[in-house]
Every structure is written in structure tokens, then in C-alpha cells.
Amino acid sequence: MCSSLLRFWAGLSKTSFIERKRVCDIEAEQKTLRLADSAGFGHVVSLLARLVSLIMPELPEVETVRCGLERLVVGKQIAAVTVKVPKMVKTDLEHFVMTIPGQQVQGVDRRGKYLLFDLGQLVMISHLRMEGKYLLFSDTVPDQKHFHVFLTMTDGSTLVYQDVRKFGTFELLPKSELAAFFQKRQLGPEPTKQAFRLKPFEAALLASRKSIKPHLLDQTLVAGLGNIYVDEVLWAAKVHPERRSASLKKAEIKRIHDETIRILQLGIEKGGSTVRTYQNTLGMNGSMQHYLMVYGQTGKPCQRCGAAIVKLKVGGRGTHVCPRCQR
């Protein structure tokens, strides 16, 4: 039981994702296993629950979760489904719990911040929201009040969805309806050079009266940006988060476009942002927090101009900005 859970979380330590070439960090996994093997199972589970609850699931973090799930559950057949919080399932609940058993997990993909479990003709769509996370147990699942969705496999293992806030969502759709699902939500392109084209991005911004930060967060311009990475992108582009989108110069828009691709790619390569140092305890967390220039740096000197970083509220979100070089 312990080893399967640890292999799963070790797989979340780092991942590189470039044009769908997926590589998990074997060195980090080996370090995690060595450390965890010396601890009792209950001790490890409690540490993991505390560690992962601090990870902010933006695109790099969701891609890191996807990498771990792909390594652990692809090829497994689902024997039973239990849902303890019905409101999490946004499609028909009875259909969800009756149809998934018997299906094989053929792949785990991602679109923006959505995880996509490929079940052949069907797809199970999972959104982690604020604090969702997955754990895999090889046999007995401990009793935990924040375990809400259970996928029991024919090999006796169980994939458990944990969510303290119960904000996560699940949907089961025919694969043929997946494109319409994302079109309805007006989900923007993936942040890659091939998909995220400058001209449509520029046109959408110049036609909008929204402030640039809330506009980037609404997922229609580009998929996957959250509070951490929007702050980082706007700092790198030297653009103040309160600027009206339509006021931006074309050179500024290009910087935002290019920095979005660069910073999200870097976040993926570093396994996401673990925003407190405690998360390095078992050596299984992302390292992007060490590359953050502005997020969480309130009062510290700007790495570019030396002015003190300040924290504002923009669109109701805590926002980190350099008051001197972001205009």
C-alpha cells in the first residue's frame, strides 16, 4: 500500500512537457522512495496531505498531476465507483457511477486546467479547483473525511480524489462531445507557440475594456493561467495588472504573449510552484517557487529595478506588482 502511494506522488515531483513529450524526474522519485521507505505509512500520508494542499493547481501543477496519473493508472480497469459528495458530479450521477465500472483507463490528458481520463468512447473530466488532489492506494484506503470520490480498480488498487473545500468537479461525456464542452466554456488555446497565436490575442485585447489581469484569468484568451503565473507574466512583460486591455501597445501585447508561453513552459519543466519551503521536506515537490520574480515577494526588492514589490487587490485577487517598472 505504501509503495504505490509513494510512487504516485514521486511521479508528481517534476515533469517536462514539450509538444506532448512527457518525462518524469526519476532522480526525484528515487530520493522520495528512499526517504519514505524509512517512515511509517500513516506518517507519510499525513505529510503528503499537508504538502499537496499548499500547491496552487494552475496549468503547470495540473500537468504535473497528469504525468503522475498517466504513469500509475493507464491500463487499469475500473471495477467500481463511489461518490460521497454528489454535487461534485455535474453530469447525471447515476449514469456516472453505473457507466464507468468496466471501463479501462486508456490515457490521461489535459486541456487547460482540466484533467481528461480517456475511457475509450467516454471521457471523465476532472477539475481540481482550489485544493483537489489524487492519491492511489494499492489495497486498503484509510478513513479520511476529505476523501470524496473513489475509483476502485480490478487489481484491488483505488484512486481517491481528496478535496478539503469540495470545489472539484467531475463530468462523464461521450468523447464526441468533448470539443463542444470546451467551446461552450470559451476555453482559449493552449499556451504553446503552435496553438497560441499572437494576432487573435492582440485583437481580443485591443477590443476589450477589461483590466489585463482579470482578462488573462478568465481562460478565454489562453488556457491555464492562474493567479501565480499571471503575476509573473505581467511582471516579465513590464505591464501593470490594472491596465485596461485596450490601452496596451502592440509591443506590450507581444511581450505578454511571449512571456505566457515561456513562463508556463518553465513552470511545467520545474514541476509547478510549491509556495512554502516546508514542501521540500520529502524532496517530491516542484521547484518553480524558486524562479518566481514577483508572486509572494511583497516588500522585497524588484529583481529588475530594486523597488519594493507591493501587493494589491485587482479584480478581487491578491496581486503582486513592481510599482516602478510595471506600467
Image (cartoon, rainbow, N blue to C red):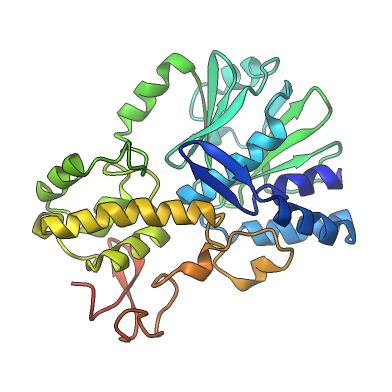
Q: Is residue 49 above or below residue 3?
A: below
Q: Nearer the viewer, residue 197 or 65?
A: 197
Report how many numbered discs are placed on residues in the image: 0
Q: Nearer the viewer, residue 157 or 28?
A: 28
> Percent position (x, y) of residue 309?
35, 80
Q: Is residue 36 above or below residue 82?
A: below
Res 203 quadrant in image: top left
Vertical order, 192 against 119 (above or below): below
Residue 116 or residue 34, whichever sits in front: 34
The quadrant the N terminus occupies is top right
Q: Horizontally, is 152 left or right of 66 in the view?
A: right
Report x, y in % for residue 91: 49, 24
- x, y percent for residue 37: 88, 56
Residue shown at 88%/61% (left/top)?
39
* Residue 84 in sight from this viewpoint: no
- On the question of residue 3 being in view, the answer is yes
The residue sitting at 76% across, 46% down in the picture is 7
Where does the image place residue 312, in percent across and percent down from the top left? 31, 73
Q: Residue at x 60, y 19 (%)?
A: 119
Q: Is residue 304 left or right of residue 141?
A: left
Residue that appears at 68% across and 47% down: 11
Q: Split into 4 quadrants, where in the image is the C terminus? A: bottom left
